[in-house]
Image (spheres, helix red, strand yellow):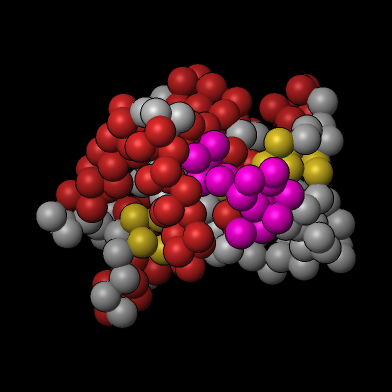
Amino acid sequence: MLGHACQAEDLSVLLGPAINIKRSPLGGRNFEYLSEDPYLTGELAKNYINGVQSQNVGVSVKHFAANSQEYNRMSSDSVVDERTLREIYLSAFETAVKDSKPWTIMCSYNRINGTFAAENKRLLTDILRDEWGFDGVVMTDDLAMEAVAAYSADGAVAVMALEAGNDLVITTDYRTQIPKVLEALESGALSEETIDTACRRVLTWKQNLGLL
């Protein structure tokens, strides 16, 4: 039904499911998240994804990862030990990636153990891509780059995000970030290979949607 609804509105990607863990009844997005249980969330998520994508409509599983509060979510730091991170906060995402192969993943605003999700190489490349085998597009949430830039020395956060495995900046962030990416590319601080990899993922995604 969700896939059919997206087709009726000429939408190629549904920005969901949201599968962070409900930790408190006061959570601002509890209405959107699926469960407080990692196993149940993973099972619900994979069937949601399979259903939507069976209609040739992509999903964007979010918010990767450990986004369990709305208050100051653009600057908060989720400090989590490895076992807790794996067993509670990453478990449903791992199930979704391995069992349903979502076309896109949307990273969260917050830091995870000191590093913003949008530029977190361990999260976006080491775990998501290398360990779990995700081969789709990683995108930011609305205005995430501007939020991260506020805490960056030079504001060139899209460069660090690309190097971490982030492929796509959505909304108006590109206006401030494209010049910084081009500058880094021209100076050699950012490799053409990194740009090519991100472009290839986005083009493959569009091809899957029939947009190329």
Q: In the visual, does 83 lie left or right of 5?
A: right
Residue 3: % across, % down: 34, 66
Q: In the visual, does 19 lie left or right of 133?
A: right
Residue reaching furthest left? 212
Q: How many marks?
A: 0
Q: In the visual, does 81 lie left or right of 199?
A: right
Residue 115: % across, % down: 71, 36
Residue reaching furthest front? 187
In the image, residue 25 above or below residue 130: below
Can you say which quadrant of the picture contains the C terminus? Answer: bottom left
For residue 209, what is the image quadrant?
bottom left
Residue segment shown in magenta: 146-161
Q: In the visual, does 48 lie left or right of 113?
A: left
In the image, residue 185 above or below residue 5: above
In the image, residue 95 above or below residue 31: above
Residue reaching furthest bottom? 9
Residue at (35, 75) in percent of width and height = 5
Residue 117: % across, % down: 63, 42
For residue 42, what is the image quadrant?
top right
The answer to if 210 sits in the magenta stretch is: no
- Residue 186 visible from this viewpoint: yes
- Front in this rendered view, residue 127 or 7: 127
Residue 84: % across, % down: 79, 29
Residue at (55, 58) in percent of width and height = 141
The answer to if 148 sits in the magenta stretch is: yes
Residue at (70, 55) in percent of width and height = 150
Residue at (45, 64) in percent of width and height = 175
Can you say which quadrant of the picture contains the N terminus? Answer: bottom left
- Residue 20 visible from this viewpoint: no
In the image, residue 49 above or below residue 146: above
